[in-house]
Image (cartoon, helix red, strand yellow):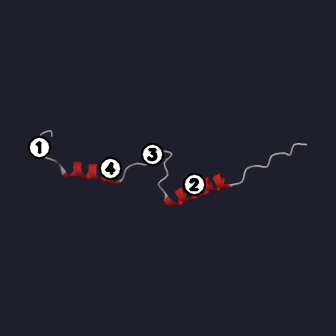
């Protein structure tokens, strides 16, 4: 383990900003964390996979 310098003073404002940033991370583009949106995407994806294939023309 690395030695930690515990004698350095730490300001409460700096800690507050760091903790707030960790508790409220920014969402990356293209990721869906909304449960309703995830459910809708899952239903659409499942419907596409379960839909019957397109009919082929009959050969004469």
Q: Report crowding for label 4: few under 14, some 14 to 19, many 20 or more residues within 10 A (C-alpha).
A: few
Q: Quadrant of the C terminus?
A: top right
Of pointers 4 and 2, the one earlier in the residue sequence: 4
* Left-right relation of 6 to 51: left
Of pointers 3 and 1, the one earlier in the residue sequence: 1
Label 3 and label 2: CA atoms lie apart by 18 Å
Residue occupying the far front of the picture:
60
Of pointers 3 and 4, the one earlier in the residue sequence: 4
Task: Provide residue 44's location: percent of width, then percent of height.
Answer: 62, 55
Name the mark on residue 41. 2
Q: Report crowding for label 3: few under 14, some 14 to 19, many 20 or more residues within 10 A (C-alpha).
A: few
Residue placed at 16% from the left, 47% from the top? 10
Say which residue label 3 marks: 28
Q: Helix or strand or loop: what does disc 2 sit on?
A: helix
Residue occupying the far bottom of the picture:
36
Say which residue label 1 marks: 8
Relative to 23, say whether 9 is above or below: above
Task: Provide residue 2's location: percent of width, then percent of height.
Answer: 15, 39
Label 3 and label 4: CA atoms lie apart by 14 Å
Foreground tag (3 vs 1): 3
Name the mark on residue 21. 4
Label 4 and label 2: CA atoms lie apart by 29 Å
């Amino acid at each position: 383990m690395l030695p930690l310098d515990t004698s350095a003073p730490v300001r409460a404002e700096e800690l507050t900003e760091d903790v707030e940033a960790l508790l409220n991370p920014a969402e990356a583009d293209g990721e869906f964390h909304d449960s309703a949106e995830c459910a809708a995407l899952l239903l659409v994806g499942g419907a596409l996979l379960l839909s019957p294939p397109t009919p082929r023309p009959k050969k004469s």
